Image (cartoon, rainbow, N blue to C red):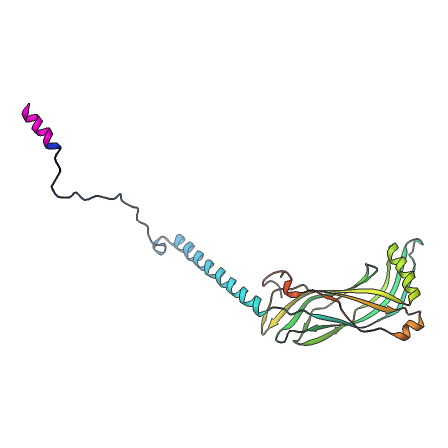
Amino acid sequence: MASQEHKIDHLDQGYNGPIIPHKDPPTPRRLPCVAVANPYALLCTAFRALTFVLIAVGVVALVLSLVFQLLNLKAYVDSAMFTRFDLGTGGNGTTAEVHYNLTVALSILNPNPKRAVVYRSLEAVALYAGERFEYMSFPRMWQERKNRTEIRPSFDGQSPVAAAPSAAFGREKGEGFFNINVKVYTRVRLNVAIVNSVVYSPEVDCYVTVPDPGNSTAVAQGFAATECAHVDDCSLLKNENLGGED
């Protein structure tokens, strides 16, 4: 009995032998990306290359947005002349119809000192009393820096009009002058060397007073050259795309 108690007491004593090292659980070995089989290595390389390209494109886009900041275009109506502007009835004898022949000399100024402007599209629209009665499109063109370029939209034909233009026509014919609105819609790029910017879409809004061709007094007074009151602030426009078509 004493022998058993001695053995039990011995178990309660501290262990002064060599330290037993603690073993961490084994961790799975991860092979480097390039050391794996070819398909996985190609995928890793492609991902890294794509990340680099995206970062590079972002930096280039930022630099180009600063380099290609478009100063506001300016526009002027140098002359406008009716050879005909009459109100009649259409073929059915009931619908009011305006008959017109209008020529406008409109100049657009590119104020950018170091950047040419590439006009991808250019369209002039004529409106009377808020209603469009004619439009004309122009081919693509190139405008040098600090350059003033003239376009001459010519509107000829007939168009049905609503009650409001009919009422305005009678009043303005008595005054001898017609109030015409000419809008110009554009899509442009800036050009530096061989590089084109993103696409901007500035719009020009011109209000002009044109003499009635049947009123000799108004014709004698002539047309007063007019600066277009509203041209979109190009720096605030939303760009349509980066790159893309020319």
Q: Residue at x 93, y 53 (%)?
A: 94
Q: Quadrant of the N terminus?
A: top left
Q: Nearer the viewer, residue 116 or 62?
A: 62
Residue 5 sits inside the magenta stretch: yes
Is residue 161 visible to the viewer in this orientation of the structure?
no
Query: Does 146 sit above or below residue 212?
Result: below
Residue 67 sits inside the magenta stretch: no
Residue 87 % position (x, y): 91, 61
Q: Is residue 140 left or right of residue 213?
A: left
Q: Nearer the viewer, residue 140 or 88?
A: 88
Residue 146 % position (x, y): 67, 76
In the figure, residue 128 lies in which quadrant?
bottom right
Q: Is residue 2 left or right of residue 170?
A: left
Q: Residue at x 91, y 66 (%)?
A: 175
In the figure, residue 70 lies in which quadrant?
bottom right
Find the residue positioned furthest to the top: 1
Residue 150 % position (x, y): 75, 74
Q: Main secondary structure of the magenta part?
A: helix
In the figure, residue 38 lies in which quadrant?
bottom left
Q: Quadrant of the C terminus?
A: bottom right
Is residue 37 visible to the viewer in this orientation of the structure?
yes
Q: Residue at x 75, y 67 (%)?
A: 229
Q: Is residue 41 left or right of residue 95?
A: left
The magenta-colored residue range is 1-9
Residue 244 % position (x, y): 60, 62
